[in-house]
């Protein structure tokens, strides 16, 4: 039972353009949604989060949008830079502090 | 300050042997999480600790897997009678007390386990 779904295994975007990574969830009992970034041979690092009562959160080049009615969130990266090439994981935080991750989307930033 | 430390970074073992994976969380972090990432897969939740107790062990794949945390600090994940399907990167993460709403996990670099 996959509660957090990232349906795109990979995404390629031209440098300078907008990258949009998508995530769907099936459970309405999540408090927060988070995005993590992972480089090879390293652990994931926290990128940005959004409360379930908000619909947008912005931090520099990164913006997360939450559509509760659609149970969908997206991460926008503008402008995309070469260092953004990584695997991005969507995660959902339950009220009991359990955190569920999606399978990840590999982002390639093309020169 | 030091981050989350995991040891060993790589472990090669023979099928049927037991292995122990260690995680040293960031000092003062109350929560500790274990995940694993199999080749081409996402992060699979295994177990998490609040202090020394584990409120949710539902992610442990079988009774060959166990974990403990002592003194609210170091945690050990033990896999008995390893199987080839146990091969994966085992990731540990810790987080401070949830005060402002969100739990932010700080991950170690993982232990790459290979079962031959």
Image (cartoon, coloured by chain):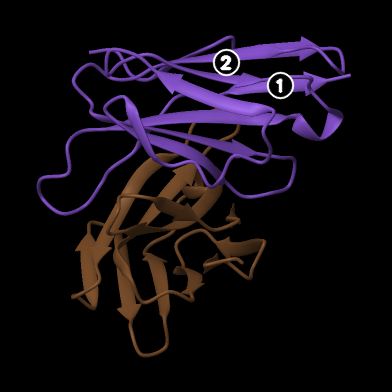
Chain colours: A brown, B purple
Q: Can residue A110 be seen at all in this image of the molecule?
A: no
The quarter of the rendered structure image containing the N terminus of chain A is: bottom right
Q: Residues within 10 Å of mark 2 (few under 14, many from 20)?
A: many
Give SS at disc 1: strand
Question: Left or right: B28 with respect to A90?
Answer: left
- Image position of A66 with respect to A50: above or below: below
A35 vs A27, nearest the viewer:
A27
Q: Which residue appears farthest toward the left when viewing the image?
A: B99
Q: What is the number of callouts on the image?
A: 2
Residue tagged by mark 1? B113
Tag 2 subunit: B
Q: Residues within 10 Å of mark 1 (few under 14, many from 20)?
A: many
Instruction: Name the spot of residue A94 as percent of width and height, x first.
Output: 33, 59
Determine contact: label 2, label 1, CB under 8 Å. Answer: yes
Question: Left or right: A70 with respect to A97?
Answer: right
Mark 2–mark 1 distance (CA, rounded to whole Å): 9 Å
Instruction: Name the spot of residue B83 as percent of width and height, x first.
Output: 83, 27
- Image position of A92 with respect to A83: above or below: below
Residue tagged by mark 2? B21
**Residue at 66% over, 61% down:** A10
**Residue at 38% over, 50% down:** A98
The answer to which quarter of the image holds residue A95 is: bottom left
The answer to which quarter of the image holds residue A5 is: bottom right
**Residue at 48% over, 38% down:** B47
- Image position of B78 with respect to A51: above or below: above
A61 vs B92, nearest the viewer:
B92
The answer to which quarter of the image holds residue A67 is: bottom left
Instruction: Name the spot of residue B81 as percent of width and height, x first.
Output: 79, 19
- Image position of B73 with respect to A41: above or below: above
Give SS at disc 2: strand
Instruction: Name the spot of residue B113 as percent of width and height, x first.
Output: 71, 21
Q: Earlier in the sequence, mark 2 or mark 1?
A: 2
């Amino acid at each position: 039972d996959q509660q957090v779904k990232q349906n795109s295994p990979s995404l390629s975007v031209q440098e300078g353009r907008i990258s949009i990574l998508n995530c769907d969830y099936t459970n309405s009992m999540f408090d927060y949604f988070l995005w993590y970034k992972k480089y090879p041979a390293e652990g994931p690092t926290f990128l940005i989060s959004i409360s379930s009562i908000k619909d947008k959160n912005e931090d520099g080049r990164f913006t997360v949008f939450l559509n509760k009615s659609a149970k969908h969130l997206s991460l926008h990266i503008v402008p995309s830079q070469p260092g953004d090439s990584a695997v991005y994981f969507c995660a959902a935080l339950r009220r009991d502090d359990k955190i569920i991750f999606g399978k990840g989307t590999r982002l390639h930033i093309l020169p | 300050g030091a981050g989350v430390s995991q040891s060993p970074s790589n472990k090669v073992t023979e099928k049927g042997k037991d292995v122990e994976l260690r995680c040293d969380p960031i000092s003062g972090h109350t929560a500790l999480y274990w995940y694993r990432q199999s080749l081409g897969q996402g992060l699979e939740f295994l177990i998490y600790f609040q202090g020394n107790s584990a409120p949710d062990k539902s992610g442990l794949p079988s009774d060959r897997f166990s974990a403990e945390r002592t003194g609210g600090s170091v945690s050990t994940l033990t896999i008995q009678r390893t199987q080839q399907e146990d091969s994966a990167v085992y990731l540990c993460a810790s987080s401070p007390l949830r005060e402002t709403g969100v739990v932010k996990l700080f991950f170690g670099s993982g232990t790459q386990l290979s079962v031959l």
